Amino acid sequence: MSDLSSGTEEGSAMDGSVLTYMFETRDFADVTVFVGATKKAFRLHRSVICSTSEFFQTACKTGTFKEGTTREIHLPEIDATTFEKVAAWQYEQGYDIQWSSGKYDLLMFQAADYLQIESLRHEVLKQLAKVCETKLCELRKIKTDFAMEELLDNFSKICELCRKSELELLGDIAKSIACHWEIDVEALLNTLNDGAYGNTFLAVMLGVHRSSRCGYGTFVWD
């Protein structure tokens, strides 16, 4: 057992990354979160998860909800893989989402929205904007059969969860999309009639489309 106050090598390593140590060992975890349909258990620390999440703050208050007494929280709405990444972010282990045409970004944003983690909402939008700026250009250069519709669908769902204060962040994503979206007007009209794209998505895309900095983003009428 290391003596954290003695200045030993083990103690210094832990002092240098306390949250990493807590995340990896789960020592002294004082709440269990059961996630997804399989009810996968995550042993976590209230002091950590409550510091960023208003949802956890409320749930963990003794005398407010039963979770505050049982110290067990059930989240069937969030899948285990997504929640593990959310928890890692809360323990300051970074934000690492692979390119998925917005699929994983949407899952993370939905989780952040449900758990009321304001800073993670912004991180998801910033990182999606960053990866779109580079990845869409790469996909265009290699002429891959990239399905823009999937990205548009996921981005539109993110837009409908956003607030007015996040419009600027959405705009950064929309700028990259507008550069590479060859709009088929007939298909777009069908999509609009189906109600697949919400008002926020349309407003953001229209707001940036004319100021697109690339040579793409043209209308296709036939």
Image: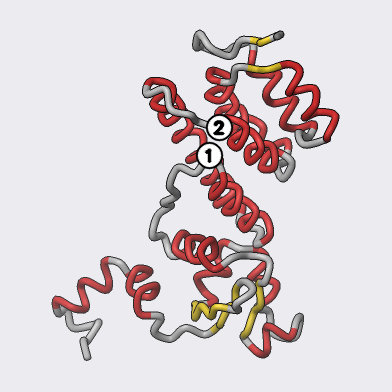
Between 206 and 99, the one lying in front of the other is 99
- Mark 2 — residue? 147
State the image quarter where residue 218 is shown. Answer: top right
- Mark 1 — residue? 101
- Is disc 1 in contact with disc 2, using a CB cutoff of under 8 Å? yes
Question: Residue at (66%, 72%) from the top-left corner?
Answer: 75
Question: Residue at (55%, 66%) from the top-left corner?
Answer: 51
Q: Residue 199: x and y, percent? A: 80, 31
State the image quarter where residue 162 is shown. Answer: top right
Question: Residue at (53%, 80%) from the top-left corner?
Answer: 41
Q: Work out how far the residue at label 1 is from the one at label 2, CA to CA, in angstroms.
A: 8 Å
Amino acid type at mark 2: Ala
Of all residues, the one furthest to the left in this rendering is 9
127 to 74, vertically: above or below: above
If the image is split into quadrants, where does the C terminus sit? Answer: top right
Q: Residue 125: x and y, percent? A: 56, 40
170 to 115, vertically: above or below: above
55 to 220, vertically: above or below: below
Query: Closer to the observer: label 1 or label 2?
Result: 2
State the image quarter where residue 183 is shown. Answer: top right
Q: Residues within 10 Å of mark 2 (few under 14, many from 20)?
A: few
Between 140 and 46, the one lying in front of the other is 140
Question: Residue at (74%, 23%) from the top-left corner?
Answer: 188
Amino acid type at mark 1: Ser
Q: Residue 85: x and y, percent? A: 48, 61
